[in-house]
């Protein structure tokens, strides 16, 4: 049975989306919920998940292309469905595969195949297989996969997992030279060309249970079979990665009711669907660690942000005395722990209300225009086991302090448990990062594209200050705004911070709507 | 009651003696079992003790031996019919398969044929027609119980159990085990059918085996232990019915299985065990199930060639190491 993967509708007003990149190649095994690609909308880039388990049989819309919401962009067939490596009979795109010019020539073939499928479906065939002379699109695709799998196995060595390779541009159904993940158990002596992963049943089950990506495991058994010890080695290797992650990835200190936003290097609304699954080859030198999927995403997004957004930084000191008092009062009356406010909750509330007054700080830069957002969705950085996530709270300006407190805790819990809901992924319009609990005075965060600013908050410290020409002690917190100079001019950023400071220093206003 | 050391041969004799004493219906019949005391001296002394009506010398007529024994059993006696070697069972196979095994079913349960067919596998320059191992043929047949003990303890226990059984039992000894010594409790005891025995515990690989090959496996296991490889040896004891749970449990633990038998590989006992393992513990296997058996040849007469035809310690060790490579 085949299942179409369609351009998802991910926003209130999303009409079309762009396939930013494919993370799986035709012929790869996919699991239900596994990230197979990235979709870029006007507001954010979000992971595309496989709706069912199976084999990615066909990529209909290539990376870089934009299609309307609900358009089929790929096809997944059931695992175990035979992928015939026989010679395709005049299947479209086959001849054009080797050294073909980019998508333009092959794409129409794909679309035609898609049309055929639709016609066949209309012809009353319940399933998606049609016994016509030319074969249904899935069969055609399947034959192409097989052939391509053979060709690629001969051409290239190890699979390229995370990069979008040139073969993708040459298009057709081939895709990158990754081994299709179909189980090899029935076909022991099938020789080199079938591209199956050889793995013992025990190893396969253990890998699945532990979330080990088989593409990154080298088999040490007979005929290169992956056996239990290879999986165990991969598990050990992965263990070495986690504890060596940045200190920010540690769990929040006990006793603090709020979640712990960590150092702000947040990828925009990007959850790791398979946390900690290493994608590096097994042959690591001592001292080296594989990059987890999350860390790869973080790396990519941060680099993109720092190299494309003209950052500048403004710092302001906020007297938090009144805010701390109000917090204590409210917490004393709180019904339970879930209701208790953290300092960060106050900052989130204040920032959201301030953003209402400064829509340009709640905007995206879109090349020739600035997109101001109707909603104020604040991303809150949360440290998780292997790195960092920035789940999003929606319409924060509409929420009471209590709601913010409750929802932020739930959100952080979901993020840490890797159980985020689709709406948690975004789209965010502004991000807040707080390293106060680590004693950091101040820091400058990196903007989370495509947002236009990010607020970095330090610790609240007892500090000597001058009030009315005399020295006194105040609870001082430093907040630094990193802003995109293309949208947020210095004066605008400064006024934003001024307003934020005013709200936090007169926090009773946060109780008003 | 203390254990004593006893040979396999004597353990069998004890079981029969106890049976003859305990139960008037028990009798022994076969070629040379009486006056001569048995080709392998298993029944020596029983003729003198119990007389010619309880220990009966028959003509060389296997078909007749089994036929008469089956009829006697149907009539209420408990005959132990000895077929000198399992090779000669071929002469009686129609009786064994078509009568002894099926009478219970074909008579709608109203008739039983509880014969104990004692016979011996084995070899020793007896050449092709006298050195075969047909346990698979009998274990293939619904209606028969088939056991093949490896030790004196198992031999006595299983033979006693057979004498209590209401079903036909093909009791396969091994001519090269008759002299094997082992500890056996004094007095009567029974080993149940369909119960395997883990003769040695280990964690790296399971050898599923029976009869003489148990000893080869244990010997190889001791050598392998010196190299840090711990082999678990599962002695099936019963070939029909098989204690599958013990076998599966062992392979679930070790993830690797080697089936070691003295019969031929093709369609042999190892085929059944391997198929079952592949089906039942598939998810626990870290390697395909291996089979090591007699070479696929009619057994040669020359003793050097004979030795090459069977798995020995060295070959078992080699195979186990290959499995763990």
Image (spheres, rainbow, N blue to C red):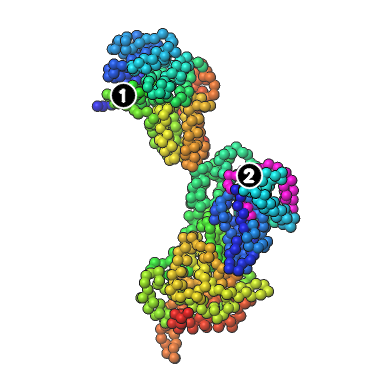
Mark number displayed over residue A406: none
Q: Residue at x 43, y 9 (%)?
A: B60
Q: Is residue A175 left or right of residue A512?
A: right
Badge 1 is on which residue? Answer: B5
Q: Chain of mark 2?
A: A
Residue A401 lies, with reference to residue B10, above or below; the image says below
Find the magenta span and give its range. A73-100
Q: Is residue B84 left or right of residue A448?
A: left
Whole-percent x, y for residue A372 in the image: 60, 75
Closest to the camera, between mark 2 and mark 1, is 2
**Label 1 crowd bin: few (<14), some (14–19), many (20+), radius 10 Å:** some
Q: Is residue A139 visible?
A: no
Q: Residue at x 42, y 87 (%)?
A: A471
Badge 2 is on which residue? Answer: A83
Spatial separation of the CA atoms under disc 2 and disc 1: 63 Å
Q: Is residue A371 left or right of residue B234?
A: right
Whole-percent x, y for residue A102 in the image: 73, 57
In contact (CB < 8 Å): disc 2 and disc 1: no
Whole-percent x, y for residue B155 in the image: 36, 24
Label 2's element?
Answer: loop
């Amino acid at each position: 049975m085949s299942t179409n993967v369609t351009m998802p509708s991910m926003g209130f007003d999303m009409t079309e989306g762009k396939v930013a990149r494919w993370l799986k190649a035709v012929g790869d095994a996919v699991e239900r919920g596994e990230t197979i690609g990235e979709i870029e909308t006007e507001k954010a880039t979000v992971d595309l998940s496989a709706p069912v388990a199976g084999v990615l049989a066909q990529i209909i819309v290539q990376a870089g292309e934009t299609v309307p919401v609900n358009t089929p962009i790929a096809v997944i067939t059931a695992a175990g469905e035979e992928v015939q490596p026989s010679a395709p009979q005049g299947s479209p795109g086959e001849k054009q595969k080797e050294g073909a010019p980019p998508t333009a020539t092959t794409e129409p073939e794909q679309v035609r195949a898609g049309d055929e499928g639709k016609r066949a479906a209309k012809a009353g065939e319940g399933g998606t297989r049609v016994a016509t002379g030319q074969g249904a699109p899935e069969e055609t695709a399947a034959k192409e996969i097989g052939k391509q799998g053979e060709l690629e196995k001969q051409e290239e060595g190890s699979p390229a997992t995370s990069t979008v390779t040139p073969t993708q541009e040459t298009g057709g159904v081939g895709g990158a030279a990754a081994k299709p993940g179909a189980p090899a158990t029935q076909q022991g002596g099938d020789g080199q060309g079938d591209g199956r992963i050889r793995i013992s049943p025990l190893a396969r089950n253990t890998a699945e249970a532990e979330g080990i990506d088989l593409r990154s495991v080298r088999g040490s058994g007979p005929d290169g079979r992956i056996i239990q010890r290879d999986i165990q080695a991969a598990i050990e290797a992965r263990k070495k990665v986690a504890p060596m992650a940045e200190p920010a990835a540690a769990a929040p200190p006990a006793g603090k009711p709020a979640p712990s936003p960590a150092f702000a290097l947040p990828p925009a609304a990007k959850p790791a669907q398979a946390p900690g699954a290493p994608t590096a080859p097994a042959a690591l030198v001592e001292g080296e660690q594989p990059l987890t999927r999350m860390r790869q995403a973080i790396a990519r997004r941060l680099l993109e942000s720092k190299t494309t957004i003209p950052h500048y930084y403004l710092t302001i000191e906020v007297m938090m005395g009144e805010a701390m008092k109000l917090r204590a009062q409210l917490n004393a009356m709180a019904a339970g722990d879930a209701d208790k406010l953290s300092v960060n909750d106050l900052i989130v509330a204040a920032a959201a209300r301030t953003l209402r007054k400064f829509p340009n700080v709640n905007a995206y830069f879109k090349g020739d225009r600035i997109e101001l957002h109707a909603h104020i969705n604040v991303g809150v950085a949360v440290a998780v086991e292997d790195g960092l996530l920035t789940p999003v709270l929606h319409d924060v300006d509409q929420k009471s302090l209590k709601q913010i407190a409750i929802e932020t805790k739930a959100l952080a819990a979901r993020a840490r448990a890797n159980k985020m809901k689709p709406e948690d992924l975004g789209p965010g319009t502004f991000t807040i990062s707080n390293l106060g609990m680590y004693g950091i005075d101040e820091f400058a965060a990196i903007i989370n594209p495509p947002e236009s600013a990010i607020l970095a908050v330090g610790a609240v410290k007892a500090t000597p200050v001058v009030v009315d020409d005399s020295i006194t002690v105040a609870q001082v917190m430093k907040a630094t705004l990193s802003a995109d100079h293309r949208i947020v001019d210095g004066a605008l950023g400064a006024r934003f911070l001024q307003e934020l400071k005013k709200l936090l220093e007169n926090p009773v206003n946060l109780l008003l709507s | 009651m203390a254990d004593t050391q006893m040979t396999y041969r004597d353990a069998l004799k004890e079981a029969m003696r106890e049976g003859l004493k305990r139960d008037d219906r028990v009798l022994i019949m076969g070629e040379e079992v009486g006056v001569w005391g048995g080709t392998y001296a298993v029944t020596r002394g029983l003729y003198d003790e119990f007389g010619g009506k309880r220990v009966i010398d028959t003509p060389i007529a296997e078909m007749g031996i089994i036929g008469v024994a089956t009829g006697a059993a149907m009539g209420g006696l408990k005959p132990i019919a000895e077929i000198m070697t399992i090779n000669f069972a071929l002469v009686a196979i129609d009786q064994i398969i078509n009568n002894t095994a099926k009478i219970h079913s074909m008579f709608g349960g109203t008739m039983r044929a509880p014969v104990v067919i004692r016979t011996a596998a084995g070899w020793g320059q007896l050449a092709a027609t006298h050195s075969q191992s047909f346990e698979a043929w009998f274990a293939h047949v619904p209606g028969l119980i088939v056991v093949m003990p490896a030790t004196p303890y198992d031999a006595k226990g299983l033979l006693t159990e057979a004498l209590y059984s209401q079903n036909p039992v093909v009791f396969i000894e091994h001519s090269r085990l008759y002299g094997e010594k082992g500890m056996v409790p004094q007095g009567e005891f029974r080993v149940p059918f369909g119960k395997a025995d883990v003769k040695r515990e280990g964690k790296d690989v399971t050898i599923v085996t029976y009869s003489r090959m148990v000893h080869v496996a244990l010997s190889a296991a001791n050598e392998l232990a010196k190299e840090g490889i711990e082999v678990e040896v599962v002695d099936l004891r019963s070939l029909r019915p098989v204690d599958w749970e013990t076998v599966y449990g062992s392979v679930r633990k070790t993830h690797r299985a080697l089936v070691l038998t003295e019969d031929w590989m093709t369609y042999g006992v190892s085929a059944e065990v391997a198929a079952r393992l592949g089906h039942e513990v598939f998810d626990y296997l870290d390697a395909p199930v291996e089979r090591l058996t007699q070479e696929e040849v009619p057994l040669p007469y020359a003793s050097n060639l004979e030795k090459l035809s069977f798995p020995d310690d060295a070959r078992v060790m080699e195979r186990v190491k290959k499995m763990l490579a």
